[in-house]
Image (tube, helix red, strand yellow):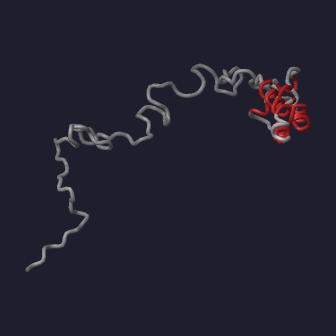
Amino acid sequence: MPEPPARSPVSENPYHQQPPQPGEPNVPGDQPVYGQPPQGAPYGTPANPPYGHAPQGAPFGQPAGQPPYGPPAGQPPYGQPGAAYPPVAPGYGYGYDPNQDPAAKSRLAAGLLGILLGSLGIHRFYLGYTGIGLTMLLVSVLGAFPTFGLAPVAVSVWGLVEGILYLTAKQGSYAVDSTGRPLRA
């Protein structure tokens, strides 16, 4: 019996489908396939642009139909004299120095109060956090007897850690008081 001719596995179509012929839809429902030119388009029509590329006429990374990024038209670029700067966070913007503010609380005072009197929450009262300060005070005083003295020890460790954080933090929640004003050095 003669052997059948050897077939290449690459050229064999396992789905027994024919590729679409000119004039036939690409997929059922007459939907174009992404990456292929639309049906009926003249030869040489580009396919859909790949993901991440801007439409023609738009700068890269700029959505079509929007004004370009940067300062408003007719104004000098940021950093130039007379330029309109982008908005800053409410409260304390560029050029604010907490060391020149007489109402700013002291970082050193808050840190030392936390280290020395942390179990009573005095550093929290000083910074305006009365709720947490009162909680620390009540846990230390009222929790001493039922916990056999462990509650004041735990709160004093809490105060010690917070005192060190107030002395070392340059930004974040340990660098401001309860109103959001930065602590002075």
From what the image shows, is residue 102 above or below residue 148? Answer: above
From this viewpoint, is residue 143 visible? Answer: yes
Residue extending furthest toward the bottom: 1
Query: Where does residue 81 sit, x and y in percent of width and height?
Result: 71, 23
Identity of the residue furthest to the front in this view: 146
Q: Nearer the viewer, residue 158 or 44?
A: 158
Numbered disc total: 0
Residue 141 image point, x, y percent? 86, 32
Image quarter for residue 65?
A: top left
The answer to whether 7 appears left or right of 156 in the picture is left
What residue is drawn where x is 69% and y is 24%? 89
Name the foreground residue: 173 vs 69.
173
Q: Say which of 166 and 152 sits in front.
A: 152
Location of residue 103 with respect to 30 vertically, above or below: above
- The image quadrant that residue 120 belongs to is top right
Image location of residue 56, percent across then percent down: 41, 34
Residue 158 in view in this figure: no
Q: Quadrant of residue 10?
A: bottom left
Q: Residue furthest left?
A: 1
Where's residue 7, x and y in %? 19, 69
Instruction: Report the residue at 22% width, 42% height from top.
Output: 27
Query: Which residue corresponds to the image point at 41% horizontal and 41% vertical from the top-left?
Result: 51
Quarter of the N terminus within the rendering? bottom left
Q: Which image quarter is the C terminus in?
A: top right
